[in-house]
Image: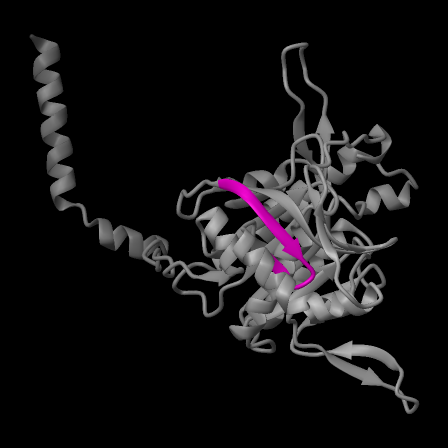
């Protein structure tokens, strides 16, 4: 009986205190009354073919997005489609190229607006335009990449860079951390630790905070993530696709697109052939939305990548692309008619030296 009375008194006292408590006043005193609303979600569009297969319009702004898969499976095509759209939207593309396989001619062919800087003899000596570009000449380590991204966001905050920014990094897993460079040893644990510290604790948080309605600009990070294949853990198990550079970016990413298969590229070449010559004009690849914390849509299917972007894997789209480029292929093949050949899917296992992971 005494316990019940004590409980009743305690509840009564609690109710009395709450009735006199002003939560808004408390929030104001603690600085907790600031804007908590996020901006309406916007997207950087990719091609209609990507949207048809994936069910999403493109890359979500204000988020961390990963494009992952084995070599030559469509990752760069998706990155360039996003960069072209960003540029058209007035978003400033910032290219961070540590893979060092960048090709300005391909970027221009995809639709990126690039100005050619020529010398007196008409030779192209540089490229310029409404973008920022850095590579291994400027950034040498994971820490350098993180510092570069933070520096541009600080310049933006200080009014010196009045643009929404879209960072395009090619690629995670292609550059070591400072300790690996210092010790002359590419240590996977050190690299993963640097990714977690530099990006998980700093860069990634700054990107997603730009989604707040109080933020004057919206920044986006799109990164190609190199992968490796982990062997099955049991005789009945399946191999797993693993991200190079550790799992920090996977955990922080809200949108992940995987191209190709888990243990192999899973692509098939589409070629124009005449005699002993051939032009590989397309490659069929698998596309899957592996993670989507933006609108929840998850889908998978096949898509065809070309040097101009993605097209749907339909006779209608492939014939239309063939018609548009037949004269060009014919000149390369020596004139006249040619035939279109589609190879079988490449299921050759991708093998990795564990020291290179």
| Direction from residue 164 to residue 334 in the image, left or right | right
Q: Give the percent coordinates (x, y) of residue 59.
A: 52, 56
| Direction from residue 245 to residue 55 in the image, left or right | left
Q: Give the percent coordinates (x, y) of residue 290.
A: 53, 38
Q: Vertically, is 124 above or below 290?
A: below
Closer-to-camera residue (185/232): 232
Q: Give the percent coordinates (x, y) of residue 295.
A: 39, 47
Closer-to-camera residue (54/311): 311
Q: Is residue 146 visible?
A: no
Tell me what residue is drawn at x 37 percent, y 57 percent: 38
State the quadrant of the N terminus.
top left
Q: Residue furthest bottom?
A: 120
Question: Would you say the magenta stretch is mainly helix, strand or loop?
Answer: strand
Tell me what residue is drawn at x 59 percent, y 59 percent: 319
Q: Is residue 323 visible?
A: yes
Closer-to-camera residue (14/50): 50
Please state the extent of the stretch shown in magenta in the rendering.
Answer: 300-310
State the quadrant of the C terminus.
top right
Q: How many marks?
A: 0
Tell me what residue is drawn at x 48 percent, y 54 percent: 51
Which image quadrant for residue 241? top right
Q: Vertically, is 280 above or below 104?
A: above
Which image quadrant for residue 349? top right
Tell me what residue is drawn at x 70 percent, y 30 percent: 263
Q: Vertically, is 144 above or below 300?
A: below
Closer-to-camera residue (72/271): 271
User: Which color mode does the image show?
Assistant: one colour
- Magenta residue check for 304: yes
Q: Give the percent coordinates (x, y) of residue 106.
A: 74, 65
């Amino acid at each position: 009986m005494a316990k019940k009375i004590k409980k009743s008194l305690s509840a009564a006292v609690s109710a009395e205190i709450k009735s006199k408590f002003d939560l808004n006043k408390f929030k104001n005193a603690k600085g907790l009354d600031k804007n908590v609303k996020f901006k309406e979600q916007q997207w950087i569009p990719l091609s209609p073919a990507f949207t048809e297969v994936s069910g999403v319009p493109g890359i979500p702004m204000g988020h961390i997005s990963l494009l992952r898969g084995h070599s030559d499976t469509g990752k760069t095509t998706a990155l360039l489609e996003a960069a072209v759209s960003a540029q058209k939207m007035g978003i400033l593309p910032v290219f961070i190229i540590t893979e060092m396989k960048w090709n300005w001619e391909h970027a221009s062919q995809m639709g990126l607006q690039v100005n050619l800087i020529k010398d007196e003899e008409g030779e192209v000596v540089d490229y310029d335009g409404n973008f920022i570009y850095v590579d291994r000449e400027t950034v040498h380590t994971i820490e350098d990449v993180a510092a570069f991204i933070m520096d541009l966001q600080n310049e933006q905050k200080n009014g010196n860079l009045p643009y929404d920014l879209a960072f395009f990094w090619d690629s995670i897993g292609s550059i070591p951390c400072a300790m690996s460079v210092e010790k002359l040893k590419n240590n996977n644990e050190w690299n993963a630790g640097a990714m977690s510290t530099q990006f998980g604790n700093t860069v990634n948080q700054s990107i997603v905070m730009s989604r707040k309605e109080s933020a004057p600009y919206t920044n986006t990070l799109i990164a190609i993530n190199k992968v490796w294949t982990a062997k099955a853990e049991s005789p009945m198990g399946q191999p797993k696709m693993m991200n190079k550079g550790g799992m920090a970016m996977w955990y922080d990413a809200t949108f992940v697109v995987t191209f190709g298969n888990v243990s192999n590229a899973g692509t098939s070449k589409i070629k124009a052939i005449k005699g002993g010559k051939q032009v590989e004009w397309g490659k069929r690849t698998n596309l899957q939305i592996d993670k989507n914390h933006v609108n929840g849509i998850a889908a998978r299917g096949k898509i065809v990548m070309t040097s101009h972007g993605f097209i749907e894997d339909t006779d209608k789209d492939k014939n239309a692309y063939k018609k548009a480029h037949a004269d060009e292929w014919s000149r390369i093949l020596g004139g006249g008619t040619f035939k279109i050949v589609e190879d079988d899917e490449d299921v050759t296992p991708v093998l990795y030296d564990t020291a290179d992971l």
